[in-house]
Amino acid sequence: MTADLNIGLTLGYWQKHTEDLTDTVLAAERLGYDSIFTAEAYGSDALTPLAWYGARTTRIKLGTAVAQVSARTPTATAMHAMTLDGLSGGRVILGVGVSGPQVVEGWYGQPFARPLARTREYIDVMRQVWAREAPVTSTGAQYPLPYPGGTGLGKPLKSIVHPVRPRIPVYLGAEGPRNVALAAEVADGWIPFFLDPGKVDAIYGDALAGRPAGFDIAAPVTTVVTDDLDTALLTAKMPLALYMGGMGAKDRNFHRDLIGRLGYAEAAERVQELFLAGRREEALRAVPDELADATSLLGPIERIKERIQLWRESPVTTILIGGVRDEPTLRALAEALRN
């Protein structure tokens, strides 16, 4: 059980056009939100907006949920994070994740094999960069340093920059129990996806059992404040239908599998079938109301205030409000979480 939930804001990635959410970020900082998180898929990147927002704020933490592992080498990501952390006065939370084979191989042109081993090595290399205890080396098969081929002239190097913090917090975006267990073992926090607070212990209890003290579970939560619950449910179903149906291959979709673990395997298969057939509206309406409601915060503010208790009774430590942009609603949500 979490007595005091932190509250943050997830801004996601750009949808079609440039989205400058400076006003929303400034409002969140004024209202005492703990953090903002950006994301990336195969359009806008996660790090550049944080530099933009970080230059306009002074306190709020700057997180990625998530930066994709295959987009950059571990030393490049470490440099990005170290630079932004220095300029922002030590405010970065670096969330990383492997994405899926469609993006990794189709967009980045990188192999997807052995994602857990790749993630483990990635985090180890980044932490070596920040610690500056010795020149960075890696004997792993995924990210060997120095590179074992080529000219043979590569040598271990140490960052010329002394970071503001020798250990920047690393969170792992993870859906499967083995990935969650890896987060509990090697990371400082876990960023789940489509989380039902009432089922965290049942699904992930064993995976999270070894997490250290202070381990942050920062859950992005679609949030719609309205008196029209039916409309709110429909809004919450949109990302569920998209990720079950379109963010993965028919026979290998991690998001569909996640929904299956939540107890909706049959519905997930149906949503994917409709979505891939181009019947998007039917796919949307095939998402169960109970699933959309359980993984979101929907309805009038008093209903949301009641349902927050479910999150307090779970291992979640941070709620990342998703989909809210205006200051009055951000204020109402902050008050609901704090009372």
Image: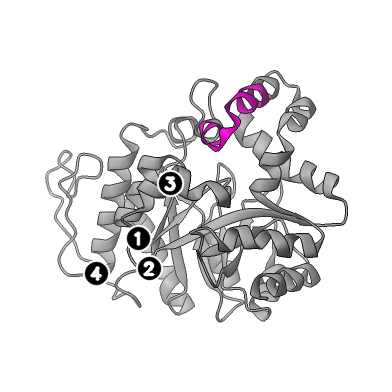
Q: Amino acid at mark 4?
A: Ala
Q: Is residue 267 magenta?
A: yes
Apparent side of residue 61 relative to residue 266 in the rendered image (left or right)? left
Q: Which mark is residue 131?
A: 4
Q: Which mark is residue 251?
A: none
Q: Residue 142, image x and y in percent?
A: 25, 40
Question: Contact (CB < 8 A) between labels 2 and 1?
Answer: yes
How far apart are the two marked residues, 3 and 2, measured between alpha carbons?
31 Å
Q: Which mark is residue 204?
A: 3
| Secondary structure at numbered mark 4 | helix
Q: Amino acid at mark 3?
A: Tyr
Q: Nearer the viewer, mark 2 or mark 4?
A: 4
Relative height, residue 101 to residue 41 (above, below): above
Q: Residue 135 falls in which quadrant of the image?
A: bottom left
Q: Nearer the viewer, mark 3 or mark 1?
A: 3
How far apart are the two marked residues, 2 and 4, measured between alpha carbons?
11 Å
How far apart are the two marked residues, 4 and 1, measured between alpha carbons?
11 Å
Q: Which mark is residue 82?
A: 2
Q: Which residue is mark 1?
A: 78
Using the image as rendered, state which of residue 73 and residue 321 is in the foreground. Answer: 321
Q: Amino acid at mark 2?
A: Met
Relative height, residue 196 to residue 103 (above, below): below
| Secondary structure at numbered mark 2 | helix
- SS assignment for the magenta stretch, majority: helix
